[in-house]
Image (cartoon, rainbow, N blue to C red):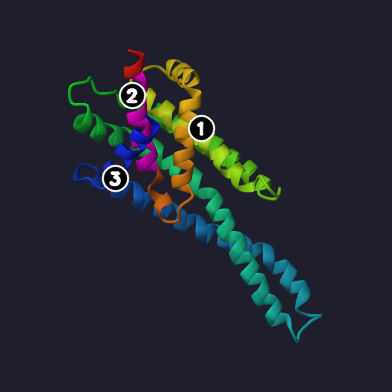
């Protein structure tokens, strides 16, 4: 069930009907990440200035090297922080485009079934902000656990697998039921959804490919919800 949903979601990414959603999702994700890059770069520069100002008067001979080293360290730190933001940014994109992705899949793959109801704008924004908060906090915890040898990589997959699986599945389920019913359905199938979330986390861990996470995750959970709902009758 899980692998079949992942296969169907992967095949959906580049089909003609999905391209407009893909370009919008990918474009906005890249724009947000570029904005974060420059914004975080300014923060790093401001934080580094007092340290360099105190260093330069006393060590004029190698202050230039110190500045270069500081810039490299800041660049590495900036890249790590930006990597931390990829999951929350893609989470926001999911809130904006899940209904469009789901519409494409339901029309093409489930033509004989009643289509889902798009979420109202207010609920969609609320869910997106909640998604951003939950995934952001979860990844901060995962980042802290990176400092603990032996569990750092596992922490990334466990945290993101749980959060991404839960939130994307509930998004897909709420097209057909109330938020409370969606949570109950997710709770009854928590193990299946968690392992599906691990596949999404693996997708998220691949550079550049992770920019397509909203499309892949939303599509996968639409299929998985259909399979679970069908199995439950």
Per the image, is 1 magenta?
A: no
Q: Is residue 3 above or below residue 48?
A: above
Residue with the mark numbered 2: 227
Query: Between 70 and 126, which is closer to the camera in this rendering?
Result: 70
Q: Residue furthest bottom?
A: 61
Q: Is residue 218 left or right of residue 194?
A: left
Residue with the mark numbered 1: 130
Residue with the mark numbered 3: 13
Magenta residues (range): 214-229
Q: Is residue 189 above or below residue 41?
A: above
How many numbered marks appear?
3
Dot in front, 2 or 3: 2
Answer with mark 1 or mark 2, whichever residue precedes in sequence: 1
Task: Name the image quarter holding the C terminus.
Answer: top left
In the rendered image, residue 16, in percent from the top left (x then y), is placed at: 19, 46
Q: CA distance from mark 3 to mark 1?
A: 26 Å
Label 1: state its secondary structure. helix
Q: Residue furthest top?
A: 233
Q: Is residue 73 left or right of residue 218?
A: right
Task: Name the image quarter holding the N terminus.
Answer: top left
Answer with mark 3 or mark 1, whichever residue precedes in sequence: 3
């Amino acid at each position: 069930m899980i692998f079949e949903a992942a296969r169907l979601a992967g095949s959906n990414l580049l089909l003609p009907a999905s391209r407009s959603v893909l370009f919008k999702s990918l474009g906005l994700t890249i724009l947000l990440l570029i904005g974060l890059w420059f914004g975080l770069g300014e923060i790093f520069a401001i934080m580094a200035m007092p340290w360099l100002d105190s260093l330069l008067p006393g060590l004029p001979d190698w202050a230039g090297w110190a500045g270069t080293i500081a810039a490299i360290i800041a660049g590495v730190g900036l890249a790590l922080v930006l990597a931390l933001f990829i999951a929350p940014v893609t989470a926001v994109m999911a809130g904006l485009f899940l209904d469009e992705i789901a519409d494409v899949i339901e029309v093409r793959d489930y033509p004989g079934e009643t289509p889902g109801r798009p979420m109202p704008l207010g609920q969609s924004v609320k869910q997106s902000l909640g998604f951003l908060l939950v995934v952001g906090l979860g990844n901060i915890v995962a980042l802290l656990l990176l400092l603990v040898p032996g569990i750092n990589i596992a922490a990334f997959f466990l945290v993101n697998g749980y959060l991404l699986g839960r939130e994307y599945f509930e998004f897909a389920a709420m097209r057909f039921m109330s938020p409370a019913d969606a949570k109950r359905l997710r709770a009854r199938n928590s193990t299946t959804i968690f392992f599906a979330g691990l596949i999404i986390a693996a997708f998220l861990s691949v550079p550049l490919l992770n920019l397509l996470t909203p499309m892949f995750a939303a599509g996968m959970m639409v299929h998985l919800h259909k399979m679970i709902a069908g199995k439950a009758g």
